[in-house]
Amino acid sequence: MNSNAGTFLYPEFISMAHLSEPSFVERIRASFARQNAMHLIRATLPVVEEGRTEIHLPHWEGVEQQHGFVHGGVVGMIADSAAGYAAMTRVPAEASVLTVEFKMNLMAPADGEQLIARGAVVRSGRTLIVTRAEVFAVKGGKESLCALMQQTIMVMHGKGEK
């Protein structure tokens, strides 16, 4: 982890695949726009970079559990999507990705005005990509880590999205 709070980088695994496809950001944003589940919870995708994405979620009544925190299932949704889209930055345009497994630790209540899920690629392979996501609750401008996830993504070569 570097000195930037909540930022983890694995520069030894940065690929050059995006150089042959300069429009990977637009492709990923278009995919996110087709995700009805993300619209349902009012999530946005403000950051798309090579091997890294961020999903932001406002805290609103529709995503709360009985104690007023953002529900753990919703925290899992944004972590899964942030890490999945980070993986998608590494695949060719004619491929798509699918989560095959993840492990999530809910470390603190998701209590804040907004949540930020930061997804990053840990290691890219032709068939499998290992990713990681950290979810932060933002309260009064201060970020607090509330969840940590590790994920395995399957690359589906030659199979686009619906």
Image (cartoon, helix red, strand yellow):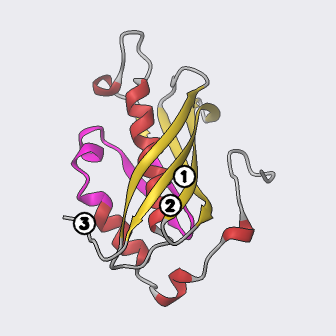
Name which quarter of the figure residue 85 lies in.
bottom left
Element carrying mark 1: strand
**Structural distance between the alpha carbons of marks 1 and 2:** 6 Å
Q: Residue furthest right?
A: 3
Residue hosting label 1: 119
Mark 1: give few (<14), some (14-19) or many (20+) Cα within 10 Å.
Answer: many
Disc 3 versus disc 2: nearer the observer: 3
Q: Which residue is mark 2?
A: 86
Question: Which amino acid, mark 2?
Answer: Ala
Q: The C terminus is located in which quarter?
A: bottom left
Cα distance between the residues tagged 3 and 2: 16 Å
Do we see residue 47 in this rendering? no
Classed neighbour count for the residue bearing mark 2: other residues with Cα under 10 Å, few (<14), some (14–19), many (≥20): many
4 sits left or right of 96 in the view = right
Is 41 in the magenta? yes
Mark 1 or mark 2: whose residue is earlier in sequence? 2
Q: Amino acid at mark 1?
A: Gly
Q: Which residues are magenta?
A: 32-56
Dot 3 and dot 2 residues touching (CB under 8 Å): no
Q: Residues at badges 1 and 3 in contact (C-beta under 8 Å)?
A: no
Badge 3 element: loop
Q: Give the image location of residue 77, x and y in percent.
A: 39, 39
Identify which amino acid the numbered label 3 is placed on.
Glu
Q: Position of residue 70 (x, y in %)?
A: 42, 24
For disc 3, the marked residue is 161
